[in-house]
């Protein structure tokens, strides 16, 4: 071994804790900033954190309310690039440091288990990649461990046991369900601490029994006399998982793991350290952490969802070209993604041109039906909004709010409801939403600007978005039904004959349904759009119908169709009619055509 | 100061005291810090020739002597507001930054001492170091109190989905509110229509809608029963219902309800029935019966309401039309028919009190005053569901002579619906849900109906913090007045929810299942 290498090993050994911290920090930052940044961008607008006295007191007046409040407070900073990863890292490091301090204080030989102290943080890091798990849950665990740290710092077991009872109360009201972690840990601590030498008896025994009784009955008392929540919610509280009826087993696993860590460390300390097999211990710990990370990632993280959230982020920021570019690199197949892609194509006047350049999945890829759940309603509202069906957008986003798993409002829905209220001239209503948004930190400016528009018709009419939507709104009165989207779009076109987006969506709707008859019936509406040539996909559909009649019909067509498309049709027909394996031969050159979609999709 | 604030925070953490107490205290502290204890100098005051702009609008109204303090606010740009309430017996002076909070005990005593008297409210405001004094407005304190308890459903005014719903009970003499049923405790069950019996105030009912454990909860002085009112012989389980004054019967409509969504911005939804009939539930025998005159083929009957003496049944009826195409021609008339309690049967002759054809309007929700003199109902352009109709108005029929009063003082909002009304037990007060403030969120408004049947300007249910409604994002649905507290708690509803429902037997009902 060279001197240089020895020096490096020595350097690593001396500062191994700092190295581990650095490595862990890098892992967390890379995981969130480069792996799942859009999960964080997606989460942020799905909450409504208000800077107001009432909101603070209302939040902290429920069990676990402080952790919930802090969770929301920090989550709002996810809007800033790097904000989310840094915040998560801060809380994960807090968890690790606390756990390490507690381990060190509780078990004499714990210094060999430093790597193990990262276990809860690594596990929680992966848990958070499932969007329903909340940052407030992590903060709750940190609060409980702070209580544990305080508890273990008291040497006199009489004082400690009395303080323990108080901490149970305090942790329950500030951190909610993590009080169970505190109780489990104190039991484990006292058993380990006392061992068999003194035994658990008398005062301490009574206090531990009292603590268990308190832990069991505190939520019962809470729900009977304070807040009548369901039993599970009273024990676990709502700050771990967005759906309060879900039992947050992965978090409970952390509670148990931390609590049983003392006897485990003691056991391995005796079995391994005493036999001088330290390196084995370190390798086992690193391997275990790696396994936990990979297992947690495969259990909780969802790369497919990250792709949709990325598209969603760009839709919210009107980055239409970016969406198309993303979809060119990775073909969307999911209804949400295809919906966003088609919207981006329509917003950049490419829907009719490039409809079949991407895989189409039928009408659902153009208009999402409402499924009585949050995601389809929230994503679906975007297309309706941009096409001018603002009342439908309002319906979808209102229902999305009602279907929010945590039963709360979101800045995203309030912004859209404000948009629609302003477009519709419902200024009292818009003002009601604006006043709420004005109490947020990151949406205050937007709300104040929106407030300036209230009751100012000409200003609204000149607004690039609201003015446009006002002009595109339906004038006729009819009932909306997603099953009859063609009728809705036809009505919209009757109101606004030059509404190009509505026309292209209507034609695309017929084409993806292979409803050639209806397509041909209404394609003449395109005359109002001042096309030099019909969009390519529409040209192909027209030529297909004409081609069925005769070549003369194709050549003598009055439709604005390019020669290039006609030539492509002849090529296609030639291959289609001559070769039994036509699909394979056509795939390379014609898979982006309506003809190929019509025959083979 | 720190100690005081610390004390407040601890109080808050220990017990869920209402945050408004804190806001009042903190406002008070702020006021003291800003102005010390000095009296406002009103010597250099300019007089404004108009009434003050206050929210909620409590100017020039008739109020019950037992109403909670009518706390109000002036625009928050105001630096200080001074209010003097003058009666013939006494006067009361209140100051605030821009909100006025009356002390409950003082306010109640003041009103009690001025029953049948007019109070004049003078408002002076300080803005940019300049005092302005406005024209006074009045509160006429009626002799007749309003029923002390107000039940309502709190729900987001959405379309088809809801997440949080509860039935709440508010003491209108103060600001106490409690939950009577909460869907968080009931597996997300929907609940609606908590309807009391004005003659037997211990009785009420409401529906719990749940696929397995739903039913109609009947409350008789705290004894709860859960009844499944659906039978093979009826269109659906009971929907809109009202008590017979004797307390043995409840008349229900049975409907197939369809929601449709508008594309234009005037209205959000149209909710209509594709078929409906009326039935009566006999809660003593657990039987359901009907009659030819209230369940005719080719007609939609809905919104039943017994007369005060229980001898007639009022209801709304429309000729069936092709739906949804003909939804704008679906118009309901207000009719009545004899009801014979002993034989559980109905007369053959149906009288029309309000003809849809004649008025080219539709009606819904008839509610008879407990003294039997008047019938209050909603009039709008078409359909059966008024809450999304901005033109929906309350009308009053004098049951002695059939005269219709369009209640211009009550329908003084230019648009947005007034509906879901209810009488107080003394027939002098009504409460109704109105979307008049923003077109979306329904709020309970009270109005006085004098002995001549004239309505007076309505006012919204007072809240401790006058800013409350600005930041409250739920609708008060179906406000219903109770003279005594319904004798059950949320936990009782949680208990009965887990139990199985009592079944009912249809007597002489045949439903052929045809839907228009």
Image (spheres, grey):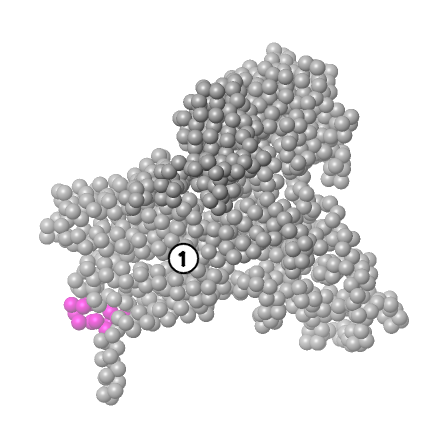
**Residue bearing the label numbered 1:** A74
| Residue B144, image x, y percentages | 52, 18
- Horizontal side of residue A296 vs A449, given as left or right: left
Q: Residue at x 61, y 50 (%)?
A: A454
**Which residue is located at x 71 percent, y 30 percent?**
B362
Q: Nearer the viewer, residue A150 or A468?
A: A468
Q: Is residue B6 visible?
A: no
Residue B416 as seen in the image, left or right of residue A257:
right
Vertical comparison of A183 with B334: above or below: below
Q: Which residues are magenta?
A: A272-284
Q: Position of residue B137 (x, y in %)?
A: 55, 29
Specify whether residue A280 is painted magenta.
yes
| SS at circle 1 | helix
Q: Quadrant of the C terminus of chain A?
A: bottom right
- At x 38%, y 44%, the residue is B34
Query: Is A209 part of what is drawn in magenta?
Result: no
Which chain is disc 1 placed on?
A
Which residue in the rendered view is the most extreme toward the front?
B44
What percent of the width, then of the height, locates residue A212? Answer: 25, 43
Residue B142 sits above or below residue B52 on the image = above
Q: Quadrant of the N terminus of chain A?
A: bottom left
Give the main secondary structure of the magenta stretch.
Answer: helix
């Amino acid at each position: 071994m060279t001197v240089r290498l020895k020096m490096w090993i020595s350097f690593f050994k001396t500062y191994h804790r700092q190295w581990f911290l650095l490595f862990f920090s890098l892992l967390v930052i890379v995981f969130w900033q480069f792996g799942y940044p859009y999960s964080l961008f997606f989460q942020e607008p799905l909450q409504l954190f208000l800077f107001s006295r009432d909101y603070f007191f209302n939040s902290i007046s429920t069990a676990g309310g402080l952790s919930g409040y802090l969770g929301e407070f920090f989550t709002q900073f996810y809007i800033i690039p790097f904000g989310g990863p840094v915040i998560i890292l801060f809380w994960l490091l807090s968890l690790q440091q606390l756990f390490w301090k507690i381990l060190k204080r509780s078990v004499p030989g714990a210094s060999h288990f430093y790597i193990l102290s990262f276990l809860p943080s690594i596990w929680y890091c992966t848990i958070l990649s499932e969007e329903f798990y909340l940052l407030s849950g992590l903060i709750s665990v940190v609060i409980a461990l702070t209580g544990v740290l305080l508890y273990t710092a008291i040497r006199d077991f009489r004082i400690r046991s009395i303080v323990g009872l108080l901490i149970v109360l305090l942790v329950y009201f500030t951190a909610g369900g993590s009080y169970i972690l505190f109780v489990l840990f104190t039991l484990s601590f006292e058993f380990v601490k006392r061992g068999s030498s003194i035994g658990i008896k008398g005062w301490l025994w009574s206090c531990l029994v009292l603590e268990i009784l308190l832990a069991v009955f505190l939520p019962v008392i809470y729900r009977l006399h304070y807040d009548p929540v369901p039993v599970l919610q009273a024990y676990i509280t709502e700050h771990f998982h967005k759906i309060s009826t879900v039992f947050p087993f992965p978090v409970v696993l952390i509670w148990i793991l931390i609590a049983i860590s003392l006897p485990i460390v003691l056991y391995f300390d005796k079995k391994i350290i005493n036999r001088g097999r330290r390196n084995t211990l370190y390798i086992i710990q690193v391997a275990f952490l790696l396994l936990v990370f990979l297992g947690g990632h495969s259990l909780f993280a969802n790369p497919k969802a990250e792709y949709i959230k990325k598209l969603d982020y760009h839709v919210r920021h009107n980055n239409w070209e970016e969406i198309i570019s993303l979809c060119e690199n990775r073909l969307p197949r999911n209804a949400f993604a295809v919906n966003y892609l088609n919207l981006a194509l329509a917003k950049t006047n490419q829907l009719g041109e490039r409809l079949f350049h991407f895989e189409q999945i039928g009408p659902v890829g153009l208009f999402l039906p409402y499924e009585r759940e949050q995601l389809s309603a929230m994503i679906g509202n975007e297309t309706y909004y941009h096409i001018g069906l603002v009342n439908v957008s309002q319906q979808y986003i209102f229902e999305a709010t009602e279907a929010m798993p945590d039963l709360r409002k979101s800045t995203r829905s309030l912004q859209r409801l404000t948009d629609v209220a302003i477009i519709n001239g419902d200024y009292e209503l818009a003002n009601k939403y604006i006043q709420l948004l004005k109490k947020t930190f990151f949406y205050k400016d937007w709300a104040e600007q929106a407030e300036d528009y209230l009751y100012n018709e000409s200003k609204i009419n000149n607004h690039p978005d609201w003015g446009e939507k006002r002009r595109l709104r339906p004038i006729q009165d009819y009932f909306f039904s997603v099953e009859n989207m063609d009728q809705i779009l036809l009505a919209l076109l009757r109101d606004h004959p030059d509404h190009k987006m509505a026309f292209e969506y209507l034609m695309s709707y017929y084409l993806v349904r292979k409803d050639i008859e209806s397509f041909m019936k209404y394609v003449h509406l395109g005359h109002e759009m001042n096309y030099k040539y019909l969009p390519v996909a529409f040209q192909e559909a027209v030529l297909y119908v004409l081609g069925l009649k005769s070549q003369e019909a194709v050549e003598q067509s009055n439709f604005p169709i390019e020669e290039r498309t006609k030539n492509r049709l002849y090529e296609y027909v030639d291959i289609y009619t001559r070769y039994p394996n036509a699909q394979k031969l056509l795939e390379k050159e014609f898979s982006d055509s309506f003809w190929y979609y019509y025959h083979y999709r | 100061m720190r100690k005081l604030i610390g004390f407040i925070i601890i109080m808050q953490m220990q017990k869920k005291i209402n945050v408004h107490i804190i806001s009042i205290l903190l406002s008070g502290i702020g006021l003291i810090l800003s102005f010390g204890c000095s009296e406002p100098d009103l010597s250099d005051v300019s007089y404004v020739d108009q009434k003050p702009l206050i929210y909620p609008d409590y100017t020039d109204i008739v109020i019950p002597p037992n109403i909670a303090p009518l706390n109000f606010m002036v625009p928050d740009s105001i630096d200080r507001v001074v209010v003097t309430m003058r009666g013939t017996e006494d006067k009361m002076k209140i100051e605030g930054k821009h909100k006025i909070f009356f002390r409950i005990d003082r306010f109640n005593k003041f009103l009690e001492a001025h029953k049948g008297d007019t109070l004049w409210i003078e408002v002076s405001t300080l803005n940019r170091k300049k005092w302005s004094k406005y024209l006074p407005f009045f509160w006429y304190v009626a002799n007749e109190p309003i029923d002390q308890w107000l039940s309502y459903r709190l729900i987001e005014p959405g379309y088809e989905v809801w997440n949080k719903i509860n039935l709440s009970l508010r003491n209108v003499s103060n600001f106490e509110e409690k939950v009577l049923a909460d869907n968080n405790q009931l597996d997300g069950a929907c609940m609606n229509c908590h309807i009391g019996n004005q003659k037997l105030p211990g009785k009420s009912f409401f529906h719990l809608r749940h696929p397995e454990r739903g039913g109609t909860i009947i409350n008789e002085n705290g004894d709860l029963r859960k009844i499944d009112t659906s039978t093979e012989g009826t269109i659906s389980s009971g929907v809109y219902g009202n008590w017979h004054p004797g307390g043995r019967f409840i008349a229900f409509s049975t409907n197939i309800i369809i929601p449709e969504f508008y594309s234009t911005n005037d209205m959000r939804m149209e909710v209509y029935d594709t078929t409906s009939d009326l039935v009566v539930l006999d809660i003593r025998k657990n039987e359901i019966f009907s009659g030819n005159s209230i369940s005719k083929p080719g007609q939609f009957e809905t919104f039943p309401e017994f007369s005060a003496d229980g001898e007639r049944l009022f209801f709304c009826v429309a000729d069936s039309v092709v739906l949804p195409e003909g939804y704008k021609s679906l118009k309901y008339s207000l009719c009545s028919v004899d009801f014979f309690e002993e034989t559980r049967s109905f007369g053959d002759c149906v009288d029309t009190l309000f003809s849809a054809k004649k008025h080219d309007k539709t009606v819904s929700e008839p509610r008879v005053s407990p003294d039997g003199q008047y019938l209050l109902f909603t009039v709008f352009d078409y359909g059966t569901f008024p809450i999304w109709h901005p033109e929906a108005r309350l009308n009053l029929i004098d049951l002695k002579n059939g005269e219709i009063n369009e209640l211009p003082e009550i329908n003084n909002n230019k648009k947005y619906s007034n509906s879901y009304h209810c009488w107080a037990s003394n027939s002098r007060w009504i409460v109704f849900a109105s979307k008049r403030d923003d077109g979306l969120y329904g709020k309970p408004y009270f109005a006085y109906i004098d002995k001549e049947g004239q309505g007076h300007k309505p006012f919204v249910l007072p809240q401790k913090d006058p800013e409350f409604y600005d930041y409250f994002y739920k609708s008060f649905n179906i406000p219903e007045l109770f003279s005594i507290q319904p004798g059950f708690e949320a936990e009782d509803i949680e208990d009965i929810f887990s139990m199985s429902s009592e079944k009912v037997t249809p007597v002489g009902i045949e439903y052929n299942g045809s839907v228009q």
